[in-house]
């Protein structure tokens, strides 16, 4: 029966404790003799690259969680520049019995390809194709897991120019029965709280830090599907936008991002454990 009492039963007396947060630094350099799996170097900015920025933020985030949130352990999926496969990242999350999975990435817009006239006659113009950097993307984006048919996903990537499938999601086959089972499990057990944590982080970044955000979007992403826990991928900013790249590489910017995520996790913990006022 829907009543205040049953609501309390859901939120308070189920005894949930947020004990372990998995902090996932996106990308890395594929090591020599790396085990079989999917690896991805990530995007490049003008003076920095995604894999170094994500590692710097993740290391700070791990320390801040353990310092500022009592009783919560933070486990890194990688702590050096060496890349770890998508498969191993999900394994680490599950082996450590994570309650929450936070993946740190940087966004980047692909170059625009344009046709430029280079001469010829009115009747027979000559063109060449040139690639023009697109630095117009700015701010954060939150990806939560959603399985889509590949054609639809491809269209979405083209339309929105989110990180390409090859970067985040090409290890997922929508026709694979295991993926279908995990997707159903995700929807039933983890989707609601994934949206919740994404919204909490988004609110901190927009309302406290005053940054631009593109909000939440669903995308088929291997680690988010295979980690058996609520999960969100945080695109912390556009590494190919000059202002965002400065911010993402600065101590102040990294600390601001980390503090926003820690405040959001604290609120999430209080909600889920039925303590605190949020
Ligand atoms: Zn990435």
Image (tube, rainbow, N blue to C red):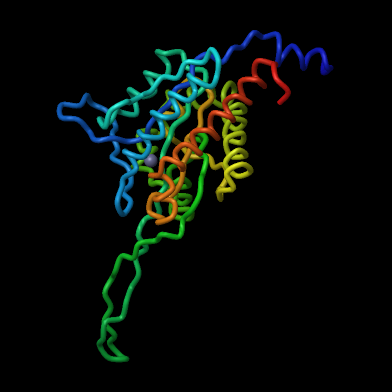
x and y percentages locating residue 194 in the rendered image: 57, 29
Task: Residue at 59% x, 30% y: name it.
Answer: 264
Image quadrant occupied by the N terminus: top right
- Using residue 182 as the reference point, say whether residue 6 is left or right of it: right
Task: Residue at 32% x, 36% y: name it.
Answer: 27
Q: Of residues 242 and 116, which is closer to you in this image? A: 242
Image-quadrant location for residue 86: top left
x and y percentages locating residue 48 in the rendered image: 31, 47
Q: Vertical placement of 12 versus 169: above or below?
A: above
Query: Outermost residue, bottom direction?
Result: 122
Q: Vertical placement of 16 versus 231: above or below?
A: above
Query: Outermost residue, front direction?
Result: 252
x and y percentages locating residue 103 in the rendered image: 44, 32
Image-quadrant location for residue 169: top left
Image quadrant occupied by the C terminus: top right
- Quadrant of ligand 1: it is top left
Q: Of residues 215 and 145, which is closer to you in this image? A: 215
Marks counted in the figure total: 0
x and y percentages locating residue 123 in the rendered image: 30, 90
Q: Of residues 53 and 38, which is closer to you in this image? A: 53
Task: Residue at 44% x, 51% y: name it.
Answer: 244
Q: Vertical placement of 268 versus 251: above or below?
A: above
């Amino acid at each position: 029966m829907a009543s205040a009492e049953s609501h309390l039963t859901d939120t308070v007396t189920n005894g949930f404790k947020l004990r372990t947060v998995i902090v996932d630094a996106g990308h890395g350099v594929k090591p020599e003799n790396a085990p079989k799996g999917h690896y991805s170097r990530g995007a490049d900015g003008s003076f920095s690259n995604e894999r170094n920025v994500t590692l710097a933020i993740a290391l700070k985030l791990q320390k801040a969680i353990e310092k500022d949130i009592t009783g919560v352990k933070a486990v890194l999926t990688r702590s050096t520049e060496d890349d770890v496969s998508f498969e191993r990242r999900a394994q680490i999350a599950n082996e450590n019995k994570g309650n929450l999975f936070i993946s740190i990435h940087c966004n980047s817009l692909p170059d625009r390809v344009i046709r430029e006239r280079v001469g010829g006659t009115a009747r027979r113009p000559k063109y060449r194709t040139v690639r023009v950097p697109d630095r117009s993307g700015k701010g954060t984006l939150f990806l939560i897991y959603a399985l889509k048919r590949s054609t639809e996903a491809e269209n979405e990537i083209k339309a929105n120019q989110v990180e390409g499938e090859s970067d985040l999601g090409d290890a997922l086959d929508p026709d694979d029965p295991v993926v279908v089972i995990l997707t159903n499990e995700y929807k039933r057990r983890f989707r609601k709280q994934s949206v919740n944590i994404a919204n909490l982080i988004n609110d901190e970044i927009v309302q406290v830090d005053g940054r631009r955000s593109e909000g939440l979007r669903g995308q088929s992403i291997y680690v988010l599907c295979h980690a058996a826990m609520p999960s969100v991928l945080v695109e912390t900013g556009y590494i190919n936008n000059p202002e965002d790249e400065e911010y993402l590489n600065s101590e102040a910017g990294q600390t601001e991002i980390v503090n926003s995520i820690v405040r959001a996790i604290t609120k999430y913990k209080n909600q889920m454990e039925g303590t605190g006022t949020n």
